[in-house]
Amino acid sequence: MMSAMPSLRRAAVRMWPASFALLLLAACEKPDHLPTVSATTALALGKLIFHDTSLSASGKQSCASCHSPDHAHAPSNALPVQLGGARLDQFGMRAVPSIRYLAATPAFAFDEEGTPSGGFNRDGSAETLAAQAERPLLAANEMANLTRAAVVDKLRRATYAPAFRAVYGEKSLDDVDTAFAALSDALQRYQLEAPEFHPFDSKYDAYLAGKVALTDAELRGLQVFNDDKRGNCAA
Ligand code: HEC
């Protein structure tokens, strides 16, 4: 009995850093103790969401992982397809496209020759960028959330959740469908409105604006590109 006291005390002393850490953790779990990230517009929120790896099942993948802003919003590596899924071991179905200049994509339709065009994704099935956002968030070989509810659950714990409520309304994260629609809207607004998605900064853009001249070789290439008899790339 006599010797139990000091050893208990020693155990308590040994345990106290752990319990202190637990206390801190409990405090951090409360939303009002989270560091808040400010964003006052849907566009700014969309940018945070686009870069947020916590919205994936792996916790390691965001939209920007496959659509890197420093690589024309295409992948930053030379792999034929990207890996995704909860353990980042699932192969993608096709090469990841750049997602620049999509503001110019018309809605899906058949043209006068019956050729399908427009819409988002390889089959044009997503009518808007907001509708498109659901696919990567839920695809088993991409961000791999099982349900919309799982995405919203993660969103509620995001550092920018208070900003999200400030922009989309106090109750915007309460209901799954409302929250998912707001998240999709923010992603769409970011892609449509942020200049980084449509910089128009190529030499050809400058040429069209009358600011630079093309070299002879470039002019010959442009002629071939526009030549109907050579397959007409422009078509
Ligand atoms: C694991 C890689 C990966 C991640 C992560 C990813 N994407 Fe993609 N993205 C793709 C692939 C592959 C395609 C082509 C799919 C298709 O065409 O069916 C694509 C297509 C798109 C398109 C359509 C492009 C077009 O021209 O139709 C948009 C827009 C897009 N992604 C936005 C996003 C957004 C927003 C996120 C985050 C919520 C995201 N992507 C996350 C791989 C990824």
Image: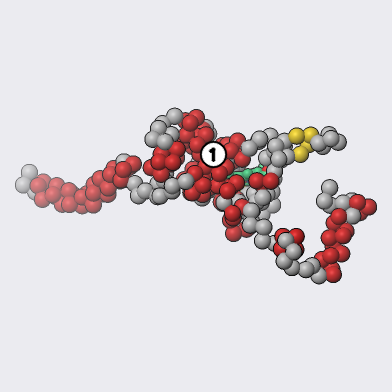
Q: Quadrant of ligand 1?
A: top right
Q: Name the spot of residue 201 as percent of width and height, x first.
A: 66, 61
Q: Name the spot of residue 48 as percent of width and height, x first.
A: 48, 49
The residue shown at (61%, 40%) is 129
Q: Which residue was labeled with disc 1?
A: 185
Q: How many marks?
A: 1
Which is nearer the eye, 184 or 103? 103
Taking the image as shown, residue 14 lies to the left or right of residue 223, namely left
Q: Is 145 drawn above or below residue 15 in the view shown?
A: above
Q: Name the spot of residue 204 as percent of width and height, x first.
A: 74, 61
- Ligand 1 near label 1 (Cβ, under 8 Å)? no
Q: Residue furthest right?
A: 229
- Residue 173 visible to the viewer: no
Q: Residue furthest bottom?
A: 215
The residue shown at (57%, 42%) is 188
Amino acid type shown at disc 1: Asp
Circle 1: is it few (<14), some (14-19), or many (20+) Cα within 10 Å?
A: many
